[in-house]
Amino acid sequence: HTIPGPFLSCSEVEAEQQAISTRQPYAYSSSIVIFVFISSSMRTATTLIALLAACLDVESFVVVQRNAATSRRITRTELNAIGVLARKAKEMAVRKYVEEGVEDEVMDKVKEMKSALESVSLDDGDEAGGPLQQVLTKRKGTVSLIAEYKRKLDDKSGYVDEIFRPEIMSPTFREFGAAAVAVMADERMGGCTYGDVKEFVLEQEKAKGEMPGPLPVISSDLIVDELQIAQAAAAGATAVTLTVGVVPADKLPFFLKAAKALDLEAIVNVASAEEAQAAVDAGANIISVAGVDGAENKKAVLADLNLPENRSVCTIANILARENQQLEEVEEAWVCRDAGFNSVWVSDALYKGGNDPVEHPGAIIKSMIAKSSVKWASPKARSGKGEGAREYLGDILM
């Protein structure tokens, strides 16, 4: 039973809730054992099985990794399969949310979206982009940083055992130089909800009139329905994330318009050159290369991107965490900066634990955006010899 679309009006939500309440439940066996053979990293295996578990409403699972020496790279077909599983799992989560009752403030945003959508055009607007795009797009030779907050990590090995609450991490991100905050609002994958998005928004608002001021808050979720965009808007977010591969290609322009109807910017996650071009053609102004390991591979995704005239596109490199304590992610951020990326998105790598004072999230943020050189500096030194990011007085004061 699918959620009605393309809009969720009050009457449609009520009808959906009634249909769900009268539907006969499916019969499952009391216990199910699933064997999934994955020839990739432990993190990819964990992600895939978590999505399978979500589809079957499984509350716990155990991952057993085979010998890493026999592993191979995951294929595009396998990635597409993961995208389908992710979409199905999230559709079930949205259905459950509708069944439990949609909040009034979210329904108000749905109505606002519906009334404004017909007049929305992705072609108009400032050539420099919206407020978030302008914050992320600094001068050439510099890089901004998006710090993502999660309550749980993909892999505990080599990471801190506990992540502090939003009221502690939110000012840390701001005071140490992040350009924006993202909150992983997918509860199964990141342990957060839209309530956490709201907490970050409220804390950032406390910094109005101060230096540095409030940061934009991005709601990072696997969006499969416009209702989730309304949830993000109701929580006070500045932007949402859309993932090509999870969002069907023919529906991407609609989601971009739905976000714009609520004055939200959209960051589109891509993992290949084809997805990047499809995102730009659909009207995306902010593209994040996600799920691609290594700076050179990320650069290759955007190498032949065909951009329309009179339109700027902000590019983000999503830095994947390494399963060690060497802070290699900092150096990758510098390489991405030198490769021309406007911003880096950092998640699990912020939470590497240890006794070294350069290993807390704030220090890692400062390291990644520092004026440092891959050739002359080390990630922990955060210094160079004239080579690296260029710093301007205006940037320092912002």
Image (cartoon, helix red, strand yellow):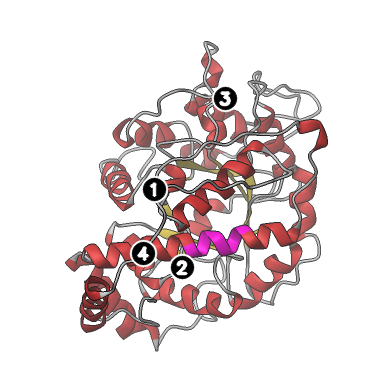
Mark 2 residue crowding within 10 angstroms, few (<14) / some (14–19) / many (20+): many
Q: Amino acid at mark 3?
A: Ser
Image quarter of residue 356: top right
Q: Is residue 167 above or below residue 115?
A: above
* Mark before the other along the chain sequence, 3 or 4: 4
In three-dimensional space, the C-alpha distance between marks 3 and 4, rounded to whole angstroms, equals 31 Å
Q: Amino acid at mark 4?
A: Val
Which residue appears at 68% of the width and 67% of the height? 275
Q: Which residues are magenta?
A: 82-88
Q: Which residue is mark 1?
A: 187
Q: Which residue is mark 2?
A: 224
Q: Which residue is mark 4?
A: 94
Q: Amino acid at mark 2?
A: Val
Residue 289 can be seen in this image: yes
Q: Are marks 4 and 2 in contact (CB under 8 Å)?
A: yes
The picture places residue 50, in percent across and down from the top left corner, at 51, 47
Q: Amino acid at mark 1?
A: Glu
Which residue appears at 49% of the width and 73% of the height? 256
Query: Which of the two marks, 4 or 2, is nearer to us in this view?
Result: 4
Judge from the rendering whether residue 231 lies leftward or rightward of residue 122; answer left or right: left
